Amino acid sequence: MAQHHYNPTSKKPTNPLSLSLTSFLFLSLLCFISLLLAFSVFKSSIPFTSSFQDLHFVSKTPSSNSCDFTDGNWVFDPTIRSTPYDQTCKEIFKGWNCILNNKSNALDISKWKWKPKTCDLPQFDALRFLQRFRDTSIGFIGDSLNRNMFVSLFCTLRRVSSDVKKWHPAKADRGFTFVQYNLTIAYHRTNLLARYGRWSPNANGGVLESLGYKDGYRVDIDVPDSKWVEAPTFHDVVIFNTGHWWWAPSKFNPVTSPMLFFEKGTPIMPPIAPDVGLDKVLRQMILYVESKTRPGSIRIFRTQSPRHFEGGDWDQGGFCPRLKPLVSQEVEELFSVENNGTNVETRLVNDHLYKALKGSSFHVLNLTHMSEFRADAHPSNAGGKKHDDCMHWCLPGITDTWKDLFVAYLDNVKHQN
């Protein structure tokens, strides 16, 4: 029997079955490689859209499992004897200083701690924050609820670093630099984000006049408010909010003083409702911020801060007498869109925010859910007003937990970068 040895110069007889199998394996390998290459190109072409990754603020680090800090409940801890700062911080607006104003549960408000279901929310470390964010500028841009949060951060940092320069960076209403660390924080007040002002009819007439409008507020959907127009180019971190003024018939009466929306200097025709105007303003302002911020900057939009009026709105005798957080059923009664109650704008505004931020480079800081429980944490009748303040928050108070969430979030974003 002839023996066959490998000879590179000899030609093997062709086996049709062997050739067919070899060809099939070769073609399969080619297809697999092609699929890998196609997937790689497709994946690299998808823009980074953090908005939906961060809607529920899932924190991930190499050393820990994922944790949703926004899913949890409030737990009372009677052993807590101190707060991150006290009522002597001069930056606290007088109406929010519930300890100084002798609100009956003022000292208990900070004893309620937010406990996520699967992890712990790190407590804010002021000294670590100053060191970690050295040579950084942070801008809070929005209505007075963002000032609530800004003051919480300032008072906590001021307790450990006393060398502070007060100024107005980028036309901010309030601003401070912690000199030793060159850390600047600022608050830019803006109610609608867009520029607005009183409108009155022109004696020569116009499209709005022809429709019978005699008074109102002009809102330029494509023009940022001058109080923050320079902020995106100045700050390394910007955190925005808007919402409370958009659902405020007492401020923008739909009959006697409606919001009249303009684009490129001319009225939008036919006139649009405030909720449609909000969508347009959000889209324009998001585009503006993305075009102005520097590479590497962090852009955040926080969700709506809930009000807790019961028995009517603020100008209808509404009040907030609770001394403990709500339970889940009470939360739904107050905030369910289906119930269409006094505080319904909280979740309605969030729907508009999520829609506008989809696909943007903004991160979303969701603090609504945890705050909906805290009907006990408003100044109420201790706010020094003729009516109960069930919108702003006592300081110290829940905005200190917002600050914990914000800083943990910043740490997470910086780690990803």
Image: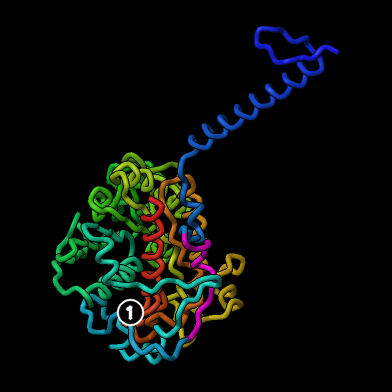
Residue 334 drawn above or below residue 101: above
Look at the image and tell me whether residue 4 can be seen.
yes
Residue that numbered label 1 is attached to: 395
Left or right of 301, for residue 187? left
Q: Position of residue 280 (x, y in %)?
A: 43, 47
Q: Position of residue 346 (x, y in %)?
A: 49, 65
Left or right of 347, for residue 412? left
Residue 325 drawn above or below residue 369: below
Residue 187 drawn above or below residue 117: above
Residue 140: image quadrant is bottom left
Q: Which span of residues is magenta-colored? A: 63-76
Secondary structure mainly formed by the magenta segment: strand
Q: Is residue 70 magenta?
A: yes
User: Residue drawn 52% across and 37% down?
Assistant: 43
Q: Amino acid at mark 1?
A: Leu
| Residue at far right of view | 1
Residue 205: image quadrant is top left
Residue 102: image quadrant is bottom left
At numbered mark 1, what does the secondary structure look like: helix, strand or loop?
loop
Q: Is residue 133 magenta?
A: no
User: Residue drawn 56% across and 75% down?
Assistant: 331
Look at the image and tell me whether residue 212 can be seen.
no
